[in-house]
Image: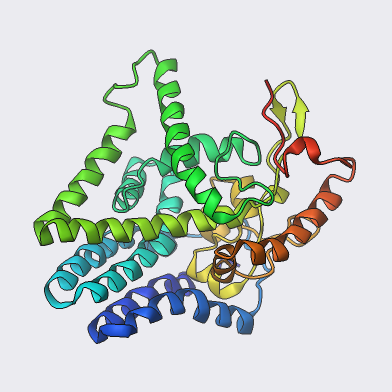
Amino acid sequence: MIPPAYLFLTAFSLVPVVVGLALLGGWWMLLIPAYAWIVLSLLDAVAGVDTTNPDPNSDADLFWHKMLTWVWPPMQFALVFGGIAYASRVMGTWESVGLMAGIGIVSGAIGINFAHELMHQKNKWERLAADLLMTMVAYGHFRSEHLLVHHRYIGTPRDPVTARYNEGFPRFFIRVLWQCLTSSWKAEAALLARAGQPWYARRNPFWRYLGFSLGFALLAYAIAGWWGVALWALQAYVAVLHLELVNYVEHYGLVRKHLGDGKYEPVRPHHSWNAGHKVTNWFLINLQRHSDHHYKPDRRFPLLQTYDEAEAPQLPYGYPLMVALANVPPLYRRVMNPRVKAWRARYYPEITDWTPYKDGTNPMPR
């Protein structure tokens, strides 16, 4: 049975939380990350995991599920730029910083996640909505990187966002900021070259990414001058930070086996970490069923499947708590490295020496 759409309204719960705390002002701003990381993790502990799967071939009407993603872009627009207006006119400096950082959690945890769902669709207007959400946080190239690089090269050295075994998040974050930009640019340029067009052709989506981002920056300037631009950039930074924290958690230490001659085994569910925690799957529209997303990228979020330990590696906690742990690399390694080693023994018992894999990532074939 497909989960009813109203369960996924949990994602929208952050909006009234942010608005309410903004009206209270002061130290209340600190409760925004507390809700996103702590409250949701406690609810996960109470609600447990969901091991049921909908029929992936169901022809049920998903209109209301889709509607959730369609109504989000204007809501986020109002939250971000309404937040800039409110902060610049009513709040002090540190209150403004706290509010826009909190809004960055919303545009990262919810907005980018909804953009991720939209960018995987075939029709142009849903992809345009994804571009608007991503450029609202100045990270438009994520669509190119995600579709052209990440899904193709997951678990190989050519995928920047496959976190290496023993790689701490701070090092990962600095690395992917540059590598995702360059890899996505090269991927789009290669597509244009195959079509006989130069990199500067009008169809290069990077011009759209740049234009939309500049447009949002100009709007922030029109609202509150350079202070408005700074506040907009702050929420964008926090949003991107959350995106890459999730990317880090989703594939940490997992690789695809190199078959020789530059070829890798096909992507399977065991190449992504799976999590069945109910509340955060409602909150993140099933993003934690990530093993199935990579196995069948064209599935809409209500139809995504979950897997047991025999089919895919399992995270011990939902994303909110895993993201919090990722900010403390020694603690994260203590929790996850034994699980990576168990994953190696389960799925690749024939590999007894992982040294050539450079701490868990197979070397780039020449």
* Rendered position, 108 above or below 179: below
- In depth, the one of 49 and 25 nearer the eye is 25
Residue shown at 30% from the left, 27% from the top:
203
- In depth, the one of 43 and 338 nearer the eye is 338
Where does the N terminus fall, quadrant-wise? Answer: bottom right
Quick check: 311 left or right of 83? Answer: right
Q: Could you tell me if residue 57 is visible in this image?
A: no
Q: Quadrant of residue 334?
A: bottom right
* Rendered position, 320 above or below 221: below
Where does the C terminus fall, quadrant-wise? Answer: top right
The percent coordinates of residue 18 (x first, y second) are 32, 76
- In depth, the one of 284 and 232 nearer the eye is 232
Residue shown at 51% from the left, 43% from the top:
175
The percent coordinates of residue 193 (x first, y second) are 41, 16
Q: Could you tell me if residue 324 is visible in this image?
A: yes
Q: Quadrant of residue 304?
A: bottom right
Quick check: 262 left or right of 82? Answer: right
* Rendered position, 174 above or below 318: above
Quick check: 347 left or right of 216? Answer: right
The percent coordinates of residue 265 (x first, y second) are 73, 34
Residue shown at 25% from the left, 45% from the top:
213
The percent coordinates of residue 4 (x first, y second) are 50, 71
